Amino acid sequence: MKTTSSKAQLPLLLAALLFLLSPVVPASAQTNISAGGSTGANATRSEDNDWWRTAVFYEIYPRSFQDSNGDGIGDLNGITERLDYLKALGIDAIWISPMYPSPQVDFGYDISDYENVDPQYGTLKDFDRLSAEAKKRGIRIIMDAVMNHTSDKHPWFIESRSSRTNPKRDWYVWVDGKGPDGMQPPNNWISEFGHSAWQYDPTTKQFYYHKFYIQQPDLNWRNPAVEKAMFDTLRFWMDRGVSGFRLDAIPTLFEDPELRDAAPIGGTNAYGDPKLDPSRTDNLPEVHDVLKRMRKVINEYPGRMLIGETYLPNTTELAKMYGPNHDELQLPMDMNLGITNKLDASIFREKINDAETKLNGNTPLFVFDNHDNPRMAARYGDGVHDEAIEKMLATVLFTTKAAALMYYGDEIGMPTTPPTRVEDVKDPIGRTGWPQEKGRDGERTPMQWDASENAGFSTAAKTWLPVAPDYKTVNVKAEEAEPNSMFNWYKKLIALRRTNPALRSGDFTMLNPDDPNVLSYERASANSKVVVACNFTAQPQKVSFTGNSLGGTAQVLAASGGPQPATVNLKEISLPPFGSIVAEVK
């Protein structure tokens, strides 16, 4: 790990001390201050530390957000340029995908230095400026912490593979191969990105394990020295003002120590490999022990928090990620709701109920989009009502009792634009799995700011990925001026979430639980009661709340899919195809 002299560290330590003495107030809290709410200068320390419970997180893929220097690649100074936009949208925290030095095999998820910034994105000085400017606007910064593996160009791995006796040999998972010549993989494990998870190294005549790309060797978390080194990297960034971390692929930290073969479960993946039971390499019990110790590190810095990338089979396993004493992750991602890829009111109702009743009172984090999945319209759209469907799903995201995570461009309805030719693919997954697997380029195209060349993302002649062809009409500038745009729908919902006490932190009750077409629920606080109804069908629907002790009328706070009167009768509300309504009970 990189070290510095005590003199060089002094300004940094002073800056960190000043930051800790001046806690960030998130955008949502600022609104409450102006409205005379309870969050503000007199808020308790506990309230400030729990800012994440009602937060709206915004994922930024730094290569694609804003290019400030005309090289066709987004950067940290570009993010700084757009902070006022994020503040106006109502964002509480930005999650920045990896911006560390990297060979960019997996576009930053193969890290060669955990305590610096890749020159493509800027410098540590640029990061400090971003951190300071974000703090001024009440926006917190969440870093991506890739704990499972490093790049094969990381100094740790270079040392590790140099000889079997190197002190860092045991920092990675090295084992002998099978067969008379030791050239066969130790077992049948398959990489997430295709083919064997074992790579033979001719220098030391052993295999190393890689859950993901060959260039991403897995760290050996059974070695205490690895844990200490990785925890120290978290402290490094928290000392620079970071408010927390999104932990990449965190259930994969450990593998079966006996290296037993995984059981086939039938079928093949996009790369032609047999599908295997993941229990040998995913979600082993030891993960929870590490998370408890990691949480203690985070707790050294009040107000910091942990998000987990937790693709898990069910809510029972998700609940374990919070820890038996609320001592592991604050917000494991609930992928069981937003990544269902099936537009069905009954399924959404079941998943939301699970989050309400099976997480032991912990706060859910709903995720509908991210950099690894096609955008919402590509997964849920029908080609006719795509915009209405996206607006309806946004209603669910921002009005349930959960922290919310959105992906850059969701607020303008950016499309998924996959490559049409294999020679244009940048994501190695797409090159390996083409044409069945086209990779993730389609959901990572540059942010569409306006109708100028390159959508206002860059002045370069060519951007790292091409801008989606609809940028002339689907862009921030155009949608800001259109009252019924996707952008203004997102902005309205986020504002309601921040200002309405029921939507911000009220209780949740599912309504009309047997309705197969409309998802309805109530949010209630001491002085406010709000009903939400979302039509999951392409046909108009009517919904009644008279059987839920909700007679009378309600003031419409927001409605999508078509016009609604200012006041509706709760005995019967009409919803257009894929329409939604948010109304405060009188």
Image (cartoon, rainbow, N blue to C red):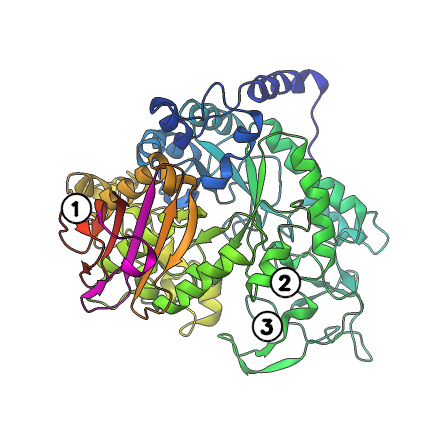
Nearer to us in this view, 173 or 309: 309
* Vertical placement of residue 426 versus 47, above or below: below
Q: Residues within 10 Å of mark 3 (few under 14, many from 20)?
A: some
Q: Is residue 541 visible?
A: yes
Q: Indicate yes or no whether the magenta region holds residue 547.
A: yes
Distance from Cα at disc 3 to Cα at disc 1: 59 Å
Label whose residue precedes the other's in the sequence (3 or 1): 3
Label whose residue precedes the other's in the sequence (2 or 1): 2
> The residue under label 1 is which amino acid type?
Thr
* Helix, strand or loop under label 3: loop
Nearer to us in this view, 199 or 188: 188
What residue is pinned by disc 2? 211
Q: Residues within 10 Å of mark 1 (few under 14, many from 20)?
A: some
* Vertical placement of residue 83 versus 200, above or below: above
* Vertical placement of residue 415 versus 278, above or below: above
Distance from Cα at disc 2 to Cα at disc 1: 55 Å
* Helix, strand or loop under label 1: strand
Q: Indicate yes or no whether the magenta region holds residue 279.
A: no
Q: Position of residue 318 (x, y in %)?
A: 58, 58
Residue 577: image quadrant is bottom left
Q: Are marks 2 and 1 in contact (CB under 8 Å)?
A: no
Q: Which residues are magenta?
A: 528-553
What residue is pinned by disc 3? 195
Closer to viewer: mark 3 or mark 1: 1
Q: Position of residue 231 (x, y in %)?
A: 70, 40
Residue name at image x 54 percent, y 24 percent: 44
